[in-house]
Image: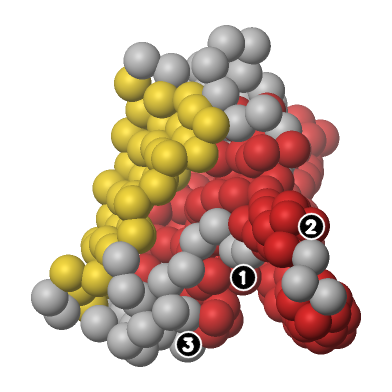
Amino acid sequence: VSLFDSIAEISRLHFVGGSLITVLGKIILFLVVLLIRKKVGGESSDVLRSTDWLRFIFFPVFTIFTVIALIMTSGNIENQKQENVFLVIALCLAGMNIVVFYMINDILKREIKIRENEVFQLKARNQTDMYRSISENFVKQRKKTHEYKNQIMCIESLIEMENYDELKDYVKSISGNLSTELDYIKTNNVIIDAILNSKYKETLDKGIVFIFQINDLSGIKMCDEDIVVILSNLLNNAIEACEKCSGKKIMKMKLVKEKDNIIISVKNTYDGKLNIKDGEIQTSKKYEMDEHGVGIKNIIEVITKYQGSYAMRNDNNEFYFSVILPN
């Protein structure tokens, strides 16, 4: 009888140990899958920050050490009750890891949808602002046309009356008004003119010094939507950063067509600390995705679409973003 009892005891211990080792293998596999997804998950892995991934990875690591401890102490099992407790603990930990895995999937899906919605809203807002600017310029032009007709009639009347002194004063006054109403920036590209003039007027209102270098951009082959994405986001980010400056508020922009390339660079002053890592602006807040970060990602998407290149850096409280696109 003692021989059969010994065989049964050995079989029971082997069953417990084998079950625990099986659970351990599954948890290690789960951890490996989690790490691979973190490294090669593409956009979905970028949604969560490294600290968030560490929180999720902590639980399978904790489970692995717990199961190893159970395996090491399984030889001391004295009865069926202890065996059942060991198995229940291991299976519960394995089940909780499965729950964690599905939680991660749900969180990633939700965060991706939130990011896509933010990107869409930002693109729509930029395009709306651009079209509003074009519409306002069109309305102003119609008003100016009507005013010019009245002004010409007044000039003709003064000439007929040979009232040249008053005519001279009148011409000076309307010439002064004309110079203030004309667009400041002309690149021979309607979309670019609308964006740049709108942003230039905004910088004047906000006390920001805007220095720019441009040339004839009539031959740009980029589609209007992509032009809006790059220029609107770069200039919006620069204006927003300058607004927060307690000292000098300066923006510099270069937008030129040179040979077969389009060069766009924007430099602006800013206050505070800015951390750039792997071509992205890093933030410290959990799940933070402000318009600045979304705008930069939109810009990079357009650059990638046209097989262009970009550089981003910050030093001496100046942020610099430069783009080269083939035309």
Label 3 vs label 1, nearer the camera: 1
Residue at image x 59%, y 44%? 237
Task: Tell me which numbered mark, 2 or 1, is placed earlier along the sequence.
Answer: 2
Horizontal side, residue 198 vs residue 326: left or right: right
Type of the residue with mark 1: Ala
Q: Quadrant of the N terminus?
A: top right
Q: Which residue is mark 3?
A: 223
Label 2 vs label 3, nearer the camera: 2
Type of the residue with mark 3: Cys
| Residue 267 falls in image quadrant | top left
How far across and how far down the image is residue 58, in percent?
59, 32
Other residues around mark 1 within 10 Å, as few (<14) / some (14–19) / many (≥20): many
| Residue 174 falls in image quadrant | bottom right
In this rendered view, identify the residue nearer to me: 58 or 235: 235
In this rendered view, identify the residue nearer to me: 316 or 54: 316
Which secondary structure lies at badge 3? loop
In this rendered view, identify the residue nearer to me: 304 or 76: 304
Judge whether 194 appears above or below 15 on screen. below
- What numbered label is drawn on residue 166? 2
Rounded to the nearest whole Å, what is the CA distance between mark 3 and mark 1?
15 Å
Horizontal side, residue 265 vs residue 150: left or right: left
Q: Residue furthest top?
A: 247
Other residues around mark 2 within 10 Å, as few (<14) / some (14–19) / many (≥20): few
Judge whether 129 appears above or below 143 on screen. above
How far across and how far down the image is residue 85, in percent?
78, 35
The reply to whether the C-beta atoms of the residues labelled 2 and 1 are less than 8 Å apart is no
Residue at image x 56%, y 78%? 191
- What numbered label is drawn on residue 194? 1
Rounded to the nearest whole Å, what is the CA distance between mark 2 and mark 1?
37 Å
